[in-house]
Image (cartoon, rainbow, N blue to C red):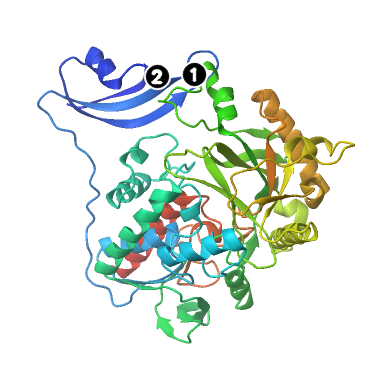
Amino acid sequence: MAKIFNNIEIPIDQDLEEKLQWMVPEHGPYRILRQSVDARRAHSPHFVYSIEVAEKGETLNIPEFNLEKIATPKEKPLIVGTGPAGLFAALRFVERGVPCVLFERGSDSGNRMKGINQYWRHGKLDTRNNVCYGEGGAGLYSDGKLITRIKSPHIPYVMNRLVQFGAPAEIQWLSNPHVGSDRIRRVIPKLREYLKANGCEIHFDTQVTEILMEGKQTVGVRTEHGTEFKSPHVILATGHSAEDMINHLNDIGVHLDGKSFAMGLRIEHSQAEINKIQYRQFSEHPKLGAANYKLADHDDKTGIGVYSFCMCPGGYVLSAGTEADGIVCNGMSNYNRNSPFANAAIVVSIDHNKLFGNDVFGGMKLRRQLETQALKSVREAGGTKELPAQNLLDFLGGPSKKGPRNLRVGSSPSGAINIRLDEILPAHMTKRIQEGLNKFNRNMKGFVVEDAQLYGIESRTSCPVRITRDNESLESISHAGLYPAGEGAGYAGGITSAACDGIKIAEKIIEKLT
């Protein structure tokens, strides 16, 4: 009978096979359940494993997630958005034998990439195809990070299906799994073709402009082309940046709530320096790769937290706006994480009730204000497409008498221009980020260094508005048949959690169909 062994410590120069042979001399096949790196200063860096081992002559019972198909339903569910929530809702439908219809305002991932490259190189924004819109959603250009804090029975299924469509197998056991932006762009087309071959009708370059209602019952959608699609089941998975859809929902009376979120800047270091801080004398060991970090500082008096988010080892800082009058930054890494730079968002928690009270759109207004101010500052400084950036020491203490320190060449394909980010952010946010950075430097000595720099504005961590839904039916609390899903609805915070949310909603609809 297979046994599970937890917390097996393996020195970086030792092999798991050797350890296993010593632990269970007569063993059969085994599989890794979890792998992490322990790099705490009390000891040398080492790997920590959980493994399942079968006895000699036995086989492992590996989950295959075979799903039961249901009889063909009368109505096809409609899904708006091809981010993780929309794609995995569609996948669950077709695997359960339910045809569905999927809408995406942007293009397929190949054509989407052309629009993104034009923006990075020449500053020509395609409002349909950018780092947030288009097939794959915002997750297509965010490292393909699959880290999640949620506990969901659907997580193994999500990982299994991603591997099935071409993701690296280790995402099923690494403690910090990532596909890489380069590899996830190969996964999404395979997933798309599977959906199309199994009953999912996909409409690219087709923005849904109206959710159709009869009283308080959802009955379908209307697209920008004037075409109507009827269904009593509409999954809304439009992502954290679809302000136009949020405004439309408000216009037709769908219940919305203001939601706390986070905003700030993105910090960039030399990856070699982060490796030295985390791995010390082992920083160049080939088995360890690019080091990451996770930092947080909570002020007990104010309740305002500062924390790192979306850390991208060996990554790039990206221009990620969706409107022509604003600038947004984000980060990504490719699978090999071989850029010489490391970056992470450093964000401040924004308490909706304290800052905006009853103004549901208060957070969205602040987001737009900072994004437009960032672009205005770039243009006033003589720039066009560059990201606003500031030397870390200048941000913490202000420029010296000789003036602002020069920016070093960084990872952003759009370039950078020297801007006083400490003056663009509201004073309370600047102060709190400064406090957090100094605290991080005490916990992670060497974090505050002269060659580090900050980029702005990191404003799309999550949607500042929640499309409130019933906890049991998962439908809007005001309109039956409307299923808010994923990050844009306020119910997820990354690729994995959004995918799980889409699956959960699909299963809830399938219950009704059966």
3D distance between C-alphas at marks 2 and 1: 10 Å
Give the residue furthest to the bottom: 226
The reply to whether the C-beta atoms of the residues labelled 2 and 1 are less than 8 Å apart is yes
- In this rendering, is residue 240 above or below 407? below
Residue 347: where, in percent of width, then height?
67, 44
Q: Which of 96 and 347 is in front in this view?
A: 347
From where the camera sits, is residue 300 visible? no
Q: Nearer the viewer, residue 241 or 392?
A: 392
- Seen at 53% across and 42% down, the residue is 315
The residue pinned by badge 1 equals 282
Give residue 409's mark: none
- Seen at 59% across and 73% down, the residue is 249
- Seen at 51% across and 30% down, the residue is 291
Give residue 12's mark: 2
From where the camera sits, is residue 188 visible? yes
Residue 353: where, in percent of width, then height?
73, 54
Q: Nearer the viewer, residue 148 or 395?
A: 395
Give the residue furthest to the right: 401
Residue 289: where, in percent of width, then height?
45, 30
Residue 313: where, in percent of width, then height?
52, 37
